[in-house]
């Protein structure tokens, strides 16, 4: 047991170091994780014999649950709804069309059976959101024509469809399905995914707001809910990955305490999940077998990248009058990644025994995709003149909206301090500092320009930079659309909620919470309990 723990700790530490190296070198981090796994593998330096695909399937499937959840949780619906029809078409019909075209190419060129060809197409039909956005985020590339949210939503939502098609192929190959049962299975997959994802998100949001879990315990609660969102529909033959994604979207676009902390936590969990998936991919691979798999993998990669994906994108985006440049970029941004690996491993542990070396072929395709598309994605966006310098790619993530650059600190006014008897408006403060409230004899006071400072006042500031944290917690709530409080005053809201409002952020502008200030949609309300 101890050697395993030492190995796991070493891999995690080394992966974090490699991720840092990736930032400086420009080499995709996931490639480095694969390389690390191959170094530890039987034909590598460490020479660890690991062929337990069943264990790898359990680990990778669990990791994919949290990747799918965070993909939904981090999607900002306000941005996503602009392109929801296009993204939905690409993540459903686009996935099917891509798989069909890949299957056609494989059947013609490699002479594999139709079902096995379609199995490969299904496994490789989904795109990898993490790979695309790790490139866009690191290079801080904003894209024109709402291309970034389109890629985010499509990549995050097409894994469930790819998963369902892979399962259907496996059922057909093992002869365990008829036409009637196939139709019923599809309805169960889709209906179960939507139903459980929606219901569990409602229950989770209700309990988070009513029970007021301590910070840290709420993270454990949501983790349990994420697992339930996958396990419950899967038990009833529903699509667990679809359920988790729906659960993530609905939860991520609602407001509840400590949401920004959760975003940071699951960002780390997702990063760790990807590390393990790609490390295991490298560990399970046998470099000597990659040589035999390279030729069919290279053909599949060419079909997928230059025929199937472009045809799918161009045909489905035709009614939306998207520019040719946008279609080319969306086509090129279809990187293959973690989901394809997980589905390939799942196929190996299934009752069906594939005639082809499915794992190493998928390994090669993913590797080629990350090397070629990952290396040239930014270059392609620049060449197509699709870069928009006024668009921040981070704006499509709810985590960005939940986190603020503002930090808070407080000072006490001692005896003989030169601020005593001065008015707030006469204080010479830097432009990035705002006085939020004043505590005087255990009474919270909203400061105004003519307010006079007295000895022993405790003044709370907001400021950009690193300063001493508050001795009490300030929570943030974003006012959603259709809220009954839109158009109501700060005073009404604060009295009803029994809270002390310290600050309002409206369209990235800090505002004093005057009693008669009317609330608007997307206002960020900073407060603490009275």
Image: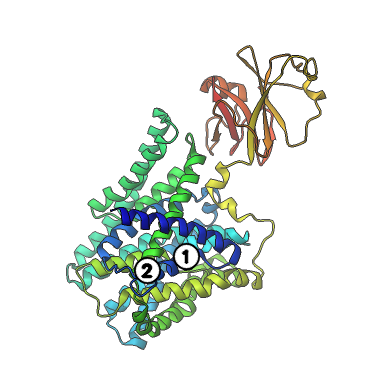
In which quadrant of the rendered image does the C terminus lie?
A: top right
Residue 224 makes an appearance in the image? yes
> Could you tell me which residue is drawn at 43 percent across and 82 percent down?
298
Spot occupied by residue 58 in the image (x, y as percentages of width and height): 29, 58
Mark sitting on residue 46: 2
Asked if marks 1 and 2 touch (Cβ < 8 Å), the reply is: no
Spot occupied by residue 255 in the image (x, y as percentages of width and height): 49, 37
Relative depth, front residue between 486 and 120: 120
Relative depth, front residue between 488 and 226: 226
Residue lying farthest top? 441
Spot occupied by residue 310 in the image (x, y as percentages of width and height): 50, 75
Relative depth, front residue between 199 and 38: 38
Relative depth, front residue between 412 and 302: 412
Distance from Cα at disc 1 to Cα at disc 2: 20 Å
Spot occupied by residue 140 in the image (x, y as percentages of width and height): 63, 59
Residue 489 makes an appearance in the image? no
Location of residue 477 by image quarter: top right
In the rendered view, does 198 fall on the left or right side of 432? left
Up/down of 257 relative to 192, above or below: above
Crowd class of label 1 (few under 14; some 14 to 19; many from 20; radius 10 Å): many
State the colouring used for the structure image: rainbow
Q: Secondary structure at mark 2?
A: loop
In the rendered view, does 345 fall on the left or right side of 413? left
Location of residue 99 by image quarter: bottom left
> Could you tell me which residue is drawn at 46 percent across and 45 percent down?
265
Q: Secondary structure at mark 1?
A: helix
Mark sitting on residue 266: none
Mark sitting on residue 30: 1
Mark 1 / mark 2, whichever is N-terminal:
1
Up/down of 2 relative to 463, above or below: below
């Amino acid at each position: 047991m101890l050697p395993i723990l030492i190995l796991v700790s070493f891999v995690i530490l080394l992966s974090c170091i490699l991720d840092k190296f990736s930032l400086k070198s420009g080499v995709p981090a996931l490639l480095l994780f694969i390389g690390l796994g191959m170094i530890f593998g039987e034909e590598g330096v460490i020479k660890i014999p690991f062929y337990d695909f069943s264990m790898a399937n359990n680990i990778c499937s669990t990791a994919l649950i949290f990747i799918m959840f965070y993909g939904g949780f981090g999607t900002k619906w306000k941005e996503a709804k602009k392109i929801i029809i296009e993204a939905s078409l690409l993540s459903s019909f686009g996935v099917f069309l891509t798989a069909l075209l890949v299957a056609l190419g494989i059947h013609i060129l490699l002479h594999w059976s139709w079902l096995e060809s379609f199995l490969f197409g299904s496994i490789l039909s989904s795109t990898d959101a993490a790979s695309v956005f790790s490139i866009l985020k690191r290079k801080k590339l904003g894209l024109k024509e709402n291309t970034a949210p389109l890629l985010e939503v499509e990549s995050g939502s097409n894994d469930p469809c790819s998963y369902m098609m892979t399962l259907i192929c496996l059922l057909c190959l093992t002869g365990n399905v008829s036409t009637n049962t196939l139709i019923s299975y599809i309805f169960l997959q889709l209906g179960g995914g939507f139903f459980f994802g929606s219901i569990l998100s409602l229950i989770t949001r209700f309990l988070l707001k009513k029970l007021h879990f301590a910070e840290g315990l709420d993270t454990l609660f949501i983790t349990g809910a994420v697992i339930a969102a996958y396990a419950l529909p899967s038990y009833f033959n529903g699509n667990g990955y679809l359920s988790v994604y729906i659960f993530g979207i609905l939860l991520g676009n609602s407001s509840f305490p400590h949401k920004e902390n959760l975003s940071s936590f699951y960002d780390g969990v997702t990063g760790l999940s990807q590390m393990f998936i790609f490390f295991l991919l490298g560990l399970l691979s046998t470099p000597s077998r990659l040589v035999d798999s390279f030729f069919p993998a290279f053909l599949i990669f060419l079909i997928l990248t230059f025929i199937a994906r472009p045809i799918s994108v161009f045909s489905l985006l035709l009614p939306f009058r998207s520019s040719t440049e946008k279609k080319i970029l969306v086509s090129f941004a279809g990187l293959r990644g973690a989901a394809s690996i997980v589905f390939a491993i799942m196929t190996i542990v299934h009752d069906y025994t594939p005639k082809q070396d499915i794992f190493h072929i998928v390994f090669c395709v993913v590797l080629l995709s990350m090397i070629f598309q990952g290396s040239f994605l930014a270059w392609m966006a620049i060449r197509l003149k699709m870069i928009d310098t006024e668009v921040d790619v981070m704006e499509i993530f709810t985590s960005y909206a939940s986190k603020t650059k503002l930090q808070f600190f407080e000072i006490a006014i001692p005896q003989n301090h030169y601020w005593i008897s001065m008015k707030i408006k006469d204080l010479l403060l830097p432009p990035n500092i705002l006085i939020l409230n004043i505590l005087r004899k255990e009474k919270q006071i909203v400061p105004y320009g003519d307010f006079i400072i007295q000895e022993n006042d405790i003044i709370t500031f907001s400021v950009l930079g690193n300063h001493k944290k508050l001795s009490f917690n300030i929570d943030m709530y974003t006012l959603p659309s259709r809220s009954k409080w839109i158009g109501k005053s700060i005073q009404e809201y604060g009295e009803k909620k029994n809270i002390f409002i310290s600050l309002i952020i409206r369209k990235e502008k800090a505002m004093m919470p005057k009693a008669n200030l009317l609330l608007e949609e997307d206002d960020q309300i900073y407060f603490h309990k009275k």
